[in-house]
Image: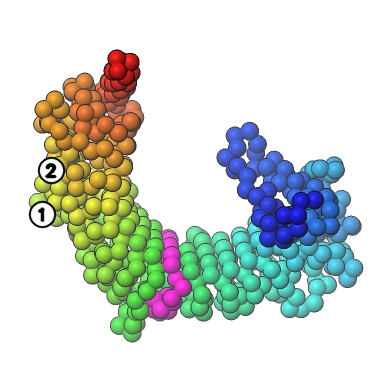
Amino acid sequence: MHQALLVCEILLEIFKHVNDIDWQNPIMSYHEIMSLVRASLAALARTCKKFYEPAMNELWAGIHGLNPLLGCVTRLRPIIYCAETETQRTWCNPYFGDVEPLSANEARQFLRHAGRVRSIYIELATNRDFRLLSVLPEETCMFPRLQTLVTASLPCPTRYLHLFLSPTLRLCALWVIDLNLKLIVTRCPALEHLSVRHTDRTIADKLPILSDSVRLCERLVTLSCPPLDWAAWEHLSNLPTLRTVTIHMNNIVPSLSDLNHITSGPFLNLTTLSFLADTTAYITTLMQHSEFPSLKKIDLFFYTLPCADAERLLHALYQCKACQTLELIRIKSYGSEVQDPDSSWAGITQFRCCPQLRTLELEFPGCCTHLDNDYLLEAMSCWPHIRSLELEDKSCPQATVTFRGLLAALRQCPHLVELRMLIDAVNIDVDFTAESLRHTSLQLLDVRSSEVVDTEAVAHVIFSMLPCVDKICHSPMDSNHANTWREVQDHLKHLRSSAVLDCQDAAAEI
């Protein structure tokens, strides 16, 4: 054996790569890939004594349900596995209704590898499964090294819950707001990542349990959950470890009446904030009473976003001291409100105070109101680092930015790689043969539903002034103008082919 393999750290790193598999493999299914991984790790464990412990640790690092551990019990093996070969096992859907609980000796067989488990996913936890473990002493921690627990429902009855409450647990993902959530966060002081998804009709009654539980977490790094009360937000605002918060409103709007009794902290290290909601009321109120001095990413998705609400939201965003640090802003609405045509509000110009922007995606009615060459230039002059810009306003179906205006704005953004917005490709106002305006970083141009008449002229403009654009996208693909933009793409391919041939001829002459 090579001397390098005697170094434990090197051996562990090699075995970890067995799990670094190509999940996008089009030939093998997920179950086939997992079977191959487990077979490989089992073969490594049988190779020699030096390989046994690290290989077994990786083999048992993550399990789905308790069946793999129950399969270590000789009496239960025929119930759990339908068929077994030397290299492959076939799972049954075991029924334990008439099976006697484990004996003391069988419990030792069951727990033999439980100490190696670091991640467990439990699809459905029922009394039928857990009664087999009744022999285990009270307060037994079945998984002393457990770091990740993902479950659809917690053990029932809850007297078995302690089996999963490891002091090393760092990530807990629940599909419901369980009554014992407070017990989990209390018994797992190392918890850093908490995710709770609850979508049934009882969610409103269980929100106090969620908020009370969150207030007991002292080391949270990421949190994803339904809406919290304001006392919970006050606690979160003072957590120096908190980095990411995602809130799914689920049609719930918590009371705003207790805000006068809340003193919010600065959310000192929060960098990512995401909301999925019907309206802007909750997030706007939160921003009005908070500060986010380190915020870099904000994702907001609304069912409805009237222009007046959008204006209040962006004003609150400006007040919460996040503008100087924001690098990604994504605000989208899937409603179809009709905006006030007399409104003087221009959505894109509200982000001029965000000089660090790398990505801006706006998709809601009114975000492109009054947008023209001047407004676009004014806004993009403030974003020297921007790399991706997307503007989609279904209430403004007519393109108001021309090629001249676009090219002038692009000169302010030398790093822009992706652009998605309507462009006036009918009234061509640039002369590609006489002007030297060029932008050499833009690679993807999505013109949305823009119209085009002279396809060859448009292709020449793009080829001459946006030379790195190798693909033009158009949506929807079945629209009336889709075919004409395909002609533009064909002209571009021809122009590039001709340019390559000209370069080859010039090189040959030299």
Give the mark nearer the N terminus: 1 vs 2.
1
Q: Is residue 232 above or below residue 303?
A: below
Residue picked out by circle 2: 373
Residue pictured at 84% horizontal, 67% vertical: 107
**On the image, which quarter does residue 182 sit in?**
bottom right
- Which secondary structure, mark 2? helix
Question: In the rendered structure, which segment of residues is drawn in magenta?
Answer: 234-252
Q: Name the kind of residue labelled 2 in the image.
A: Asn
Q: Residues within 10 Å of mark 2 (few under 14, many from 20)?
A: some
Residue 437 magenta: no
Residue pictured at 69% horizontal, 74% vertical: 162
Residue pictured at 20% horizontal, 61% vertical: 353
Would you say residue 345 is visible in this rendering?
yes
Q: Name the kind of residue labelled 1 in the image.
A: Ser
**On the image, which quarter does residue 431 sit in?**
top left
Q: Along the horizontal axis of the image, is 443 left or right of 307?
A: right
Picture coordinates of residue 490, whole percent (x, y)? 31, 21
Q: Tell which tag, 1 or 2, sits nearer the viewer.
A: 2
Residue picked out by circle 1: 344
Picture coordinates of residue 505, whole percent (x, y)? 30, 15
Picture coordinates of residue 85, whole percent (x, y)? 85, 42
**On the image, which quarter does residue 274 sit in?**
bottom left
